[in-house]
Structure formats: structure tokens, C-alpha cells
Image (cartoon, rainbow, N blue to C red):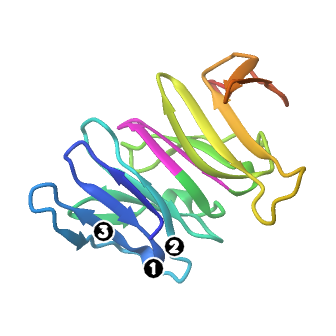
Amino acid sequence: LYKIDGGVDGRLYVVGEGGLILVRDPRSRAWSRVSSDVTRSDNRLLTISCPRSAPYECWAVGGLGTALVLSGNQTGFSTSPYFSELSGLTGVWVQDARNAWAVGSDGLTMHFDAHVNGRVNYRPAVPLTTAMLHGVGGRDGVILAVGGELGTPTPDQRGVILVRGDESERFLFDGRSYAATGSLRRTVGGFNQ
């Protein structure tokens, strides 16, 4: 099992190996397996995100070599065909019924319309980083994608935080002030970066 998220209806969803999706009913408190159409061998679901408002459909992503993207709810999940050209995805966040964000290897960041069968709206032609991005989330119009180097810790090992929707040049973290570095792009593809 890898990640867990909850929806507006009080259900909890868990994803894992073998395309596994579990749901916990808030009334009975019972866990059950949710059906999905995952049949391929590259079938790890690494994370799941559910919107905090209706209409209600969760998105799960994974696949280590080729992206695996599913959407659904407690009645079942189905695979989206719109992401088959992507490498594996490691993070997803559903902001609302019209906006979802996914991240993955080689700095992949992507914004898509979660309501229109996963139609991809925007993916930068040039990634903002080459690091693996592990998670994505947001609040109040600011989207954060995080990741970095995994493996044996070294003194020069780095983490990466990509920020969208906040044009600050300095950020506080644990009481220390950090300056934003890299290529700061005000607008790319119609979205503030």
C-alpha cells in the first residue's frame, strides 16, 4: 500500500501494488476492494487524490515505466487513455472538478481537466527541473510540486520545490529565508509559473 486520501462523501481510498484500490465506507467502517480495469504488469498505483467538492471523482496515478492513470469512485475505476505516451507518474492532486495536477520523473509537471475524461490541457515543453517529482498539492491558488534526489544521502543531495501562483522571490522554511533560484517564468502556456 502506498497512499491514502479521502473524499467529500467521507470515504477513504487507498492505492497500492497490482492496481489495488481499497475504499472505506464511513457508515459501516468496512474496507472493500474497488474494481478497476488495470491489466498490465506495470501496475503500481503510487498515489490518489479526491476533490473536496462535487462533482466527485478521484484520480489515481502510478506505473514505473509508462504512466498509469485511473479515475473513478467507490463503484469502480477505469484507465484513462490520454496519458499513454508519458513515463511513470508519482503524484496527483485534484484541485476541483476542472483542475488536476500530476508530476513524475524528469521533472514532469502537468495540468489537466479532470472533468473531461482526463484531456491534457498543458504540459511544459521543457521541464523546469530534471529531478524526480514525488508529490503535488496546493491551497489558495498556489500549487507546489516537490521532489529531488533519492538514494544514499550525501552532503550535496538536493530537494526541489516548484511553486506556481506565487511570485515571491523569498520563502520562509523552518524560520530560515530562502531565495528562489533557477529560471523564473512569469507565464508559460497561459498559466502563471
Q: Which of 148 and 177 is in front in this view?
A: 177
Q: Which residue lies furthest to the front in this view?
A: 175
Q: How crowded is mark 3: few (under 14 residues within 10 Å), some or many (20 or more)?
A: some
Label 3: state its secondary structure: strand
The quadrant the C terminus occupies is: top right
Camera sees residue 39: yes
**Amino acid beneath label 1:** Gly
> Is residue 101 rendered magenta in the image?
yes
Q: Residue furthest top?
A: 168
**Side of 30 where 188 appears, left or right:** right
Whether pointer 3 and pointer 2 mark residues with C-beta atoms closer than 8 Å, the reply is no
Label 1: state its secondary structure: helix
Residue under circle 3?
22
Residue under circle 1?
18
Q: Residue at x 76, y 54 (%)?
A: 106
Q: Which of 153 and 186 is in front in this view?
A: 153
Q: Position of residue 96 (x, y in %)?
A: 37, 35
Label 2: state its secondary structure: loop
Q: How crowded is mark 2: few (under 14 residues within 10 Å), some or many (20 or more)?
A: many
**Side of 50 where 64 appears, left or right:** right
